[in-house]
Amino acid sequence: MSEHVLEGDPPVRLVLRRSARARRYSLRVSRLDGRVTLTMPKSASPARALEFAREKAAWIRTRLADRPSEVLADFGASLPVDGRQMRIEAGSRNLLDMEGGRIVVSQRSKSAPAAVLALLRALARDRLVAASDHFAEGLGRDYSRITLRDTCSRWGSCSSAGALMYSWRLILAPPEVLRYVAAHEVAHLAEMNHGPRFWAQVERLYPGYQAHRVWLRSHGETLHRYRFAERAD
């Protein structure tokens, strides 16, 4: 892969990627981080690829402009947490004031975004462990462990060894959506597939899950608009 800059207003960073499977040029603009990737056939000319990108410049900039605006989790910002909007404020110590709708960060913290991230990850673990325990009991199966990550392509997974993985960003979604993902992954303890028997297990564990699955497909990318560190120039 190689990086180039597409001149214009504004300039656009472009990544050229060769693929043995590609039969034509294709562009992808990530709605998560704004990364622009141009995939081209292995034998194609980079000069021709850049010419193709210039021809599609208007389309690229339109797609970038349509991305949800980013929010840095700093003092004064508001974030959706466990189904409610919460404002980040300064205080004497770090805590989540759920009743007051506040994320309180100590004024002595070196980084407010990092402090907010730690609070959200801890709450996400509590909620996901509780949901996983509940659904595992209903299924009559045990899981081996739970890990939290910041994944871009999936909200959860279940290994053949019964290890559950979740994106901590689910705490930014409505609580019903978080519970749907937990039910989905726990159901894999019985059915390691996405066939009819698997979806029957999900329905048994969490009736009416379909609406929450639709929400995640339609709005899940917005959970990645919240940043917890300054971007490097």
Image: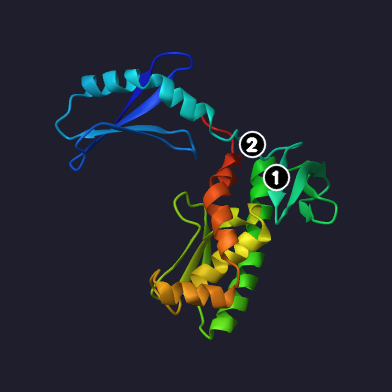
| Label disc, if present, on residue 46 of the rendered structure | none
Considering depth in this image, is 100 or 200 the residue closer to the camera? 200
In this figure, which residue is indicated by the disc labeled 1?
Answer: 79
Instruction: Tell whether 174 sits left or right of 62.
Output: right
In this figure, which residue is indicated by the disc labeled 2?
Answer: 71
Vertically, is 85 above or below 46?
below
Instruction: Tell whether 22 sits left or right of 164.
Output: left
Instruction: Tell whether 176 sits left or right of 98.
Output: left
- Binning the other alpha carbons within 10 Å of mark 2 as few (below 14), some (14 to 19) or many (20 upward) gives some
In percent of width and height, residue 205 lies at 57, 76
Q: Which residue is drawn at 36% across and 22% down?
A: 56
Q: Which residue is drawn at 44% across and 74% down?
A: 198
Kind of residue sitting beneath label 2:
Val
Q: Is the N terminus in the top left, top right, bottom left or bottom right quadrant?
A: top left
Q: Which residue is drawn at 60% across and 72% down?
A: 207
Q: What element carries label 1?
A: strand
Residue that lies at the very extreme toward the top in this rendered image? 8
Considering depth in this image, is 220 or 136 the residue closer to the camera? 220
Q: In which quarter of the image is residue 4?
A: top left
